[in-house]
Amino acid sequence: MRAFVYHGPGIGHWDSVQDPVIEHPADALVQVDAATVCVGDLHMLRGEDSEVRPGTVLGHEAVGEIMEVGPEVHELVPGDEVIISSISACGHCLQCREGTYGQCTRGGGWLLGHEINGTQADFVRVPFADHSTYKLPYGLAVNTAVLFSEALPAAFELGVRNGKVRPGAVVAVVGAGPVGLAAVSIADISSPSRVISVDLLPRRLEMATYLGADAAELPGRLIAELSEGPGADVVIEAAGTTDSFTLCTRAVRSGGHIANIGMHNSAVTLHLEQLWRKNLTISTGQVDGSSTRWLLDTLTSQHVQRLSRLITRELGFAQTGEAYEILATAAETGELRTALRRSG
């Protein structure tokens, strides 16, 4: 088969590799119909995670067709169309029973494209398939369905749910990339009184307005108004930079909540000399994917139709390297997610 393979920091190629096989009784083999590239994949390609070894197929988000299942897979049969979760869950340990799949202690967690071969390939082996895939709902477009692998669960779990967004809350989302924009839209489920989006790119701010933001502006006036006034009840950090986190500490009210989604690869200074009196709650975490089924059942057709706009480009699998290049400059161009599609 063909796959996008990591060969060392900054080096990835669309190569011929061996087809995956069933290795454990709970595995399934999936023919990938659509995949995508996220910031986590970009960090892997850049060599910023020492756990990723040269020769690893990258990618951890996909939609595809079940081709074969192991003897301990009971919920899936060949021919089923499934969404592959970015997180593999054994389904039995304490952490999995509590829904924190990313902390699985019996061999799960972030495996695909990280510890084992991933989804940017013709075929992928999915561990713990019964607990790590979701059957594709009838009528859900494949390009939209791939967002349920990680982007939408991350927005809900780490932003809306961890931030404890409540009816009447003022919510500020700092960073209007795919996950931040998803948080803007999904926050509507909790009936906030106002959702504010902050980003550096006008194109992304326009998308935030389309997705339901009550206000969407460059950092400046909105943040100043929040910091000088009562502040936001919940501030969702979705950019993953030092400056964005500092903006969050300025925008949140006393007694409020900062919910961190962004992946931080450099140190962030926590100015406790300024914040110790504010009685803040700061939550962090890795996506679990435990909300995926709930999101599939709960998001309205209007939500899903709008969220489909997070896919701003479609390429073939052989163009996966180009998708990484697009993502690397997305902070300047405003591109969101690229859908990678199997041809034929």
Image (cartoon, helix red, strand yellow):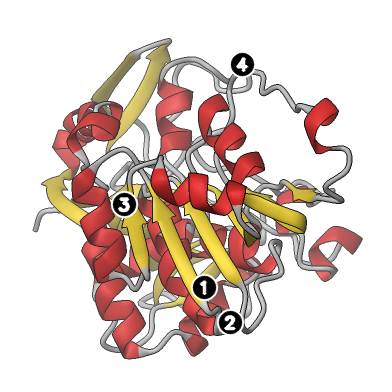
Which of the 4 quarters of the picture holds residue 66? bottom left
Question: What residue is disc 3 on?
Answer: 35
Question: What residue is disc 1 on?
Answer: 187
Q: Is residue 241 above or below residue 69?
A: above
The quarter of the picture where the C terminus appears is bottom left
Foreground disc of the pair 3, 2: 2
Mark 3 vs mark 2: which is more N-terminal? Answer: 3
Q: Dot 2, crowdedness within 10 Å: few (<14), some or many (≥20)?
A: some
Picture coordinates of residue 143 (x, y %)?
24, 64
Picture coordinates of residue 174 (x, y %)?
48, 47
Question: What residue is disc 4 on?
Answer: 50
Question: What residue is disc 2 on?
Answer: 190
Q: Residues at badges 1 and 4 in contact (C-beta under 8 Å)?
A: no
Q: Is residue 285 left or right of residue 9?
A: right
Q: Is residue 138 above or below residue 271?
A: below
Q: Residue at horizontal 49%, vertical 55%?
A: 173
Q: Is residue 72 visible from the viewing direction of this image?
A: yes
Which of the 4 quarters of the picture holds residue 209? bottom left
